[in-house]
Amino acid sequence: MKVLFIGGTGNISTPCSRELLRRGVELVHLNRGSSTPDFPEGKVRSIHCDVNDEAALTQALEKESFDVVVDWIAFRPEQVLRDIRLFTGKTGQYIYISSASAYRKPPLQPVITESTPLINPYWDYSQLKILCERELFRAWEETGFPATVVRPSHTYGESWIISSFGSRDYTAAARMLEGRKIPVHGDGQSLWVLTHAEDFAVGFAGLVGNPNSLGEAYHITSDELLTWDRIHQLLASALGVKADIIHLPLDFIEQEAPEFGPGLRGDKSYSVIFDNSKIKAAVPDFQPRISYARGIRRSVVYLEAHPEKKIIDTAKDALMDRMISTYLQGFAGA
């Protein structure tokens, strides 16, 4: 089976690449070549091209055809429409990586299935993903374009450190190691689901080339439920320290740091429980095995071995300090 990844070197797509290679898939990456994950030499063929340059993309793919195409990076409807033009008649399956943040916010019921409506009035990222899905299902219904939609939720890999305010940097871990307060949104008791990318990869790989998945949508998540307080406490435990958590109301965060508002109001501030019956029926091998306690320990160990990846977002760090100071001053002056 020959598979094209548009992208392929990200937090989720890298473990998925490794899983497909393990299964003997012929894998091609289409990207700008700015990232170079550690794959076995010669196992992944790369096509370097700006995917937003349709003329260059058309030329690069002119003599290519694939059993499966996976777009990891498209988040605007025009990008999906471009893919439909490019790959109609040139692939047996097109998998679009959407987002579980597209599900109805606020939720009307705690358990989320694939039939939960897609409505998110708070976050433009989620709104764009919804529009992309609509274009794909319209193409499936009208022309038979072989689309499958996959909706990851909060999925992390070996270099991610989870916090309320982003997971792509080491800022939260550094604060904990220095004994500084770590802000958590709300009261810290809402339920959240974190999925290790290696577990996700098993479910994803089972959909690749699966004819029964055409015209369908699947979320792929862990079954483990954690409060946000517990998420931060487990990170602290992995670091060998205790978390000094301070709870900040969502309204206050939106006022002091509006850039974080959409992602919190439109996603992380609600309790989520995903029903994974559909992906487990389609891919019986998918049984998430990596608990967050284990996964975050692996991340800490990995980053200790790769100190160059311990990136601290100094602007975000300073913003956290300002929010905490302002909030505590408000209490003192009350």
Image (cartoon, helix red, strand yellow):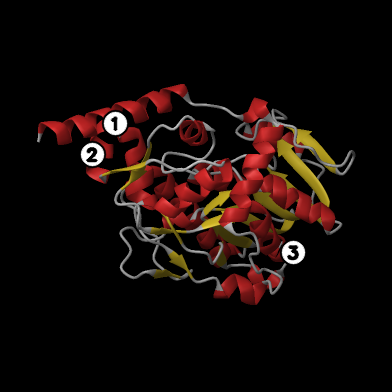
Q: Residue 60: x, y in percent? A: 76, 35
**Tag 3 secondary structure:** loop
- Mark nearer the N terminus (1 vs 3): 3
Q: How far is mark 1 from mark 2, CA to CA?
A: 9 Å
Q: Residue under circle 3?
A: 209
Q: Amino acid at mark 3?
A: Gly
In this rendering, position of residue 26 left or right of residue 331 = right
> Is 305 placed above or below 92 here?
above
Kind of residue indicated by mark 2: Phe
User: Foreground: 134 or 142?
Assistant: 134
Sort mark 2 into few (<14), some (14-19) or many (20+) by Cα contacts within 10 Å.
some
Circle 2 residue? 252
Residue 155 drawn at (x, y percent): 56, 51
Q: Is residue 7 left or right of residue 141?
A: right
Image quadrant for the C terminus? top left
Tell me the quadrant of the picture where the N terminus can be found.
bottom right
Most extreme residue toward the left, as rendered? Answer: 334
Q: Nearer the viewer, residue 333 or 220?
A: 333
Mark sitting on residue 26: none
Q: Nearer the viewer, residue 179 or 262?
A: 179
* Residue at (27, 45) in percent of width and height: 250
